[in-house]
Image (cartoon, rainbow, N blue to C red):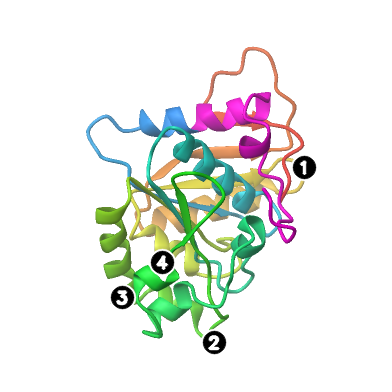
Amino acid sequence: MSKATNKRHLISFVEPKSPISEAYRALRTNIDFSSVDDNIQVIMTTSASPGEGKSTTISNLAVVYAQADKKVILIDSDMRKPTMHHTFGVSNRKGLSSILSRQCEINEAVQITDVPNLSVITSGPIPPNPSEMVASQRMSALIEELRKMFDIVLIDTPPTLAVTDAQIVSTKCDGALLVLDSGKVKRDMVIKAKQQLTQVNAKILGVVLNNVKQKNGDGYYYYYYSNAEN
């Protein structure tokens, strides 16, 4: 990325032929094939706790979808600790909170990035009531409008054990990815995070397990990659 403010290493953009970039492409492929009958267009990521790599995962997933000639929009709905404006080096003056509070229209908040085919809606100014904002009918209407404008809609949400935002957003998406840090997250935390999503009938597409060295013979619905940054 060319902007000096970018603090997250988008490896799928700067090193598209690396094994880690290939892992993101494998993730994209498996999402595409995860449901034969349903159209998976709106996808969110969450994690059990902060710092497990969910924002890095969805940023790189957005890049590889864009590289596949999909028209992609990435929304930063983590309005408590937003990061996407740093990742892509764009302004956060107008964003999701601006749209939901009727301070601007959708087209005013959509920003193009250095990655061809990839646009972002940053979080916007931090609001006092993020949960109420993402639960609003205007949030639902926004997602439906973006479905018409883009091939893929990706949404980054806060950790599910910290606040209810991820559960709320999951009810508006076609599927959810749970991103976990193998060296950090505890078993009971994973179980609780999964329960919270299933309680609202979220469709969990799979789990991305970070910071695990690849093992021979693994063929489960997990995607291992090492040295991921958050």
Q: Quadrant of residue 213?
A: top right
Element under disc 1: loop
Which residue corresponds to mark 3? 138
Q: Nearer the viewer, mark 4 or mark 3?
A: 3
Q: CA distance from mark 2 to mark 3?
A: 17 Å
In percent of the image, x 36 and y 68: which residue is there? 107
Where is residue 92 shown, x and y percent of the image? 58, 72
- Amino acid marked by disc 1: Gly
Where is residue 185 shown, x and y percent of the image? 70, 49
In percent of the image, x 27 and y 29: which residue is there? 36
Callout 2 environment at 10 Å: few (<14), some (14 to 19), or many (20+)? Answer: few
- Compare marks 2 and 3 and give the one earlier in the sequence: 2
Callout 1 environment at 10 Å: few (<14), some (14 to 19), or many (20+)? Answer: few
Q: Nearer the viewer, residue 179 or 69?
A: 69
- Amino acid marked by disc 3: Arg
Where is residue 123 shown, x and y percent of the image? 53, 70
Q: Which residues are magenta?
A: 1-27
- Amino acid marked by disc 2: Pro
Q: Nearer the viewer, mark 4 or mark 2?
A: 2
Which residue corresponds to mark 4? 168
* Image label count: 4
In percent of the image, x 66 and y 29: which residue is there? 20
Query: In the rendered view, does 70 fall on the left or right side of 129?
Result: left
Element under disc 3: helix
Q: CA distance from mark 4 to mark 3?
A: 13 Å
Depicted 139 relative to depicted 29: above or below: below
Q: CA distance from mark 4 to mark 2?
A: 17 Å
Query: In the rendered view, does 139 fall on the left or right side of 21?
Result: left
- Compare marks 4 and 1 and give the one earlier in the sequence: 4
Which residue corresponds to mark 2? 128
